[in-house]
Amino acid sequence: MEDRIVEKDFGDLAVNMGPQHPSTHGVFRLKLYLQGEKINKIESFLGYLHRGVEKLSEKLNYDQLPPVLERDDYLSPTSNSLGFVNAVEKICDIEVSRKASYIRVLIAELQRISSHLVALGTYGLDLGGALGGGASLFLYCFREREKILDIMEDLTGTRFHTNMNQIGGVRYDVKTESIDKIKKLIIELRPILEDYTNMISKDEIFMKRTKNIGVISKELAEESGGSGPILRGSGVNFDIRKNKPYECYPELDFKIPLGQNGDAYDRTIVRMKENIESLNIVEQIISGIPSGNIHSRKPLKSAKLTKPPKGSSYFSIESPRGELGFFIVSDGTSIPYRMKIRAPSFSNLSLVEKLLPGTFIADSVVILGSLDPVFGDVDR
Amino acid sequence: MFNSFIEFSLPIFKTISILILIVAYLVWLERKVAAKMQSRVGPYSVGYPHGWLQPLADALKLMTKDDSIPKNSDSLLFNLGPVWIMVVSLASFALLPFYFDNPMLNIDLSFMLFIAISSLIIIGIFISGWSSNNKYALISVLRMTAQIISYEIPLVISLLIPCILIGSLSFGDIIRFQESTWIIFYPILGQLSFIIFFISALAEGNRIPFDLSEAESELISGYTTEYSGIKFALFYLAEYVHLFGICVLGSIIFFGGSNGPFFSHNILIVIKSLLFFTLILFIRWSFFRIRIDQLLKFNWIKLIPLSFAGLLLACFAKYYMDFN
Amino acid sequence: MKLVRIFKNIFRNLSFTLSNIGKPAVTIKYPEERRVFPDKLRLGTFGLTSDKETGEENCIACKLCERICPSEIIEIDIEKRDGRGWAKKFNLDLQSCIQCELCVQVCPVDAIIMMKEAEKPTTSRADLFLTKAKMMRNAENLEESWAKGSLLQDSHTPTMGEKK
């Protein structure tokens, strides 16, 4: 009798979330080993967007590098060039004027808001579907972001890769008409962003799908190398703008929102609250831009004239994704000897190996979205 | 004999042609309403200024696309799937008094047969997902089968509650009973049964917030991944036909059918079902979707006991009414 | 109670999206409507200017723009006569330009500038490879952007006072 019933043990079903996928936020390949709907094991493959920026920087001069480096983390371009320019100024000992510092922080904070709006909008696409409620959230966030991009176009000339930061200062000056436009933008944006924060944080289906999913405990967050909203969502109070301040941040007054549990819900809420804090910073900046020069060096003639002394330096800033660091080794010529970028999304993405096994397929998309990777930053 | 054939088939042609026209323009309506809710302009260029030729342009485009069959698939089942779904969805319309006084199939057990026929749709979905030879289609079809079979029960029971109060199952009696007031205004049972019916209708028609097996962001496109061309169009239209059928059913049983707020005419069934459809559209473009295990837990733990409680309450209410 | 919270939630979500129906659409229906470009626009094509009074070309072929371009798209050939340099050949490959405007910044004579309109979309790659004649025609026909070499260098000089 027992011979008729043969139990076979089928292994795991291997499903490929390939490089082209609507929800992996970029080109990322994940191989999931499924048992029913639960994930047992994953394998991940990176490198689909590698463009060789670090090798390219061994051929270009220091003055030519900021426009190229802006294409690194393409959702907040000025943070890349801000970090690089500060690192070079640290080796050369150049003092940046206060007015240039204020303009740099103005553009960096505006781009922080636009980057967080993109993160929220695409998170809505993951949760709700490209044809459905998620698409409504996506289009609302991008509609607000268009207003910010119009301001950037008015200040600098392009909507996105602004190329404002140069070694020693900023490229353009700010006119009074632009300041009036920014004042009008703040008055328009503040109730809208608070409204979105309120609506999302109390949405029943959003809470059901993101609470207790992808929990990163405080110890795991501290020892893993994650940074940015991931660290602050778990309750660790560390922000480079407060702990190791740079530019003109010591003069500005802002708070750091913290989360409690470290799940996907907390991380999203931390990002949305950071938006409002950035609006406060922008308001303080435009109410008191000092007068002065916008550049501290002689006007740019040839890139070969910038020759930093021999040495090395490391400088890190707080990009919307975490700690973005530049390590430069210079050997006295106008071309860097070695430039290494410490990419925040690369270290954040390594948490995926610990978080995904044991959850459902539907949760894997939620967890990836809350880590907010940008693959230009991961692969450089 | 030829005369009786024409007499026999004329209502079928009339119904099917009106139905296909309405469903094609339901797609246009959905795109326009969705665009208005999202601060954009929907179709506007084909058939300027409001894009009312867009469904025709879509149908022509889909007809000229490449019709490919995967290599290791079962080609008979692969080609049969969309046809099955469309035929069954259209066949279930034979039981509804849609615009004409009597339905084509005038029997006593009206809506039970409607639900029985439309529950054959899941076979068509299953064979099209299985024969695609694709892991994504397989996972999505497994989820969908579990979802549709589970939500049949509250659908039937919530439609039985008004029928117990009325005392008969045929459409004619239901419409005649609602000449004074609609069922939805009945003290507690009307609203309770409408809410349960609405949730199960959303789940049966695969609409957000329960659409986790078709318009996915996790598993590309569900059971329609391998389809292109005219077969894809058949899937799309069949979903709208089935949903429209459920809307007509809901407007007959809960909203009075042809007894309007001010006057009575047969056209009011169409108008009321269109308004019901618009309500379902608003819900689609405003909410996220839930996960499959939360969906099934919600059904078996909360919805089915609630519907059984409502049924018991309806029996007591009817006994009380008959007793006095 | 939980049920009340769910209902309030549903009504709040629905009212948020439904209240958007009355507001006007934000789409700009190209090509019937166009949007207004700001002064400093940087996504256009390039132009080589000439002197307003004499009609001479401004470019002295000093090759500063060729050396600073990060994408290396400019090619210049120099010829000397009449006491100054002239550009015999000035090629610019518009397909690889990253619109950083560094070439405009370093030009000492305001020769190369960016225009406020982009090149027309075309189906052949040769149309996007700008030659000297094409760029001089651009400077005559199209509108100029705000940024010029002398303006930028003046505002960067550390000895200048406050400028608005």
Image (cartoon, coloured by chain):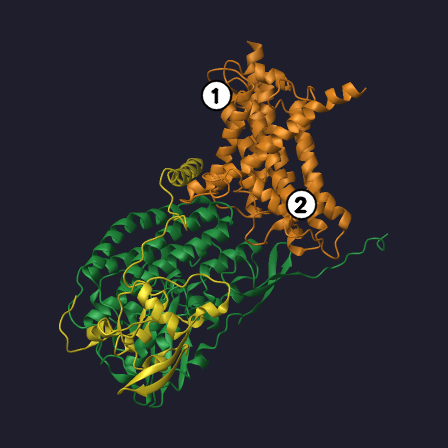
Q: Which mark is residue B185?
A: 1
**How packed is label 1: few (under 14 Cα within 10 Å), some, or many (20 or more)?**
few
Q: Which residue is drawn at 43% across and 51% down?
A: A138
Write down which chain is painted orange: B
Which amino acid is tagged 1?
Phe
User: Is A243 rendered above or below residue B324?
Assistant: below
The earlier-in-sequence mark between 1 and 2 is 1
Residue B107: percent from left, percent from top = 70, 20
Q: Which chain carries label 1?
A: B
Residue at position x 29%, y 81% from top? C60
Chain A, which colour?
A: green
Residue B162 against residue A121 in the figure, above or below: above
Whether discs 1 and 2 lie on one chain: the answer is yes
Q: Which residue lies furthest to the left in this view?
A: C161
User: Please, what secondary structure does the residue beneath circle 1 have?
Assistant: helix
Asked if one can make out residue A214 in the rendered structure from this viewpoint, the answer is no
Q: What color was chain C assigned in the picture?
A: yellow
Q: Circle 2: is it few (<14), some (14-19), or many (20+) Cα within 10 Å?
A: many
Give B152 or C148, whichever is nearer the viewer. Answer: C148
Q: Quadrant of residue A171?
A: bottom left
Residue lying at the far top in this picture: please name it: B324
In the displayed structure, C35 sits above or below B10; it is below
Seen in the image, is A209 located left or right of residue B224? left
What is the x, y in percent for residue A78?
Answer: 34, 68
C76 on left or right of B216: left
Q: Quadrant of the C terminus of chain B?
A: top right
In contact (CB < 8 Å): disc 1 and disc 2 = no
Label 1 to label 2: alpha-carbon separation: 42 Å
Task: Determine the residue positioned at 38% across, 54% down.
Answer: A269
Question: What secondary structure is marked by label 2?
Answer: helix
| Quarter assignment of residue A114 | bottom left
Residue ID for mark 2? B231
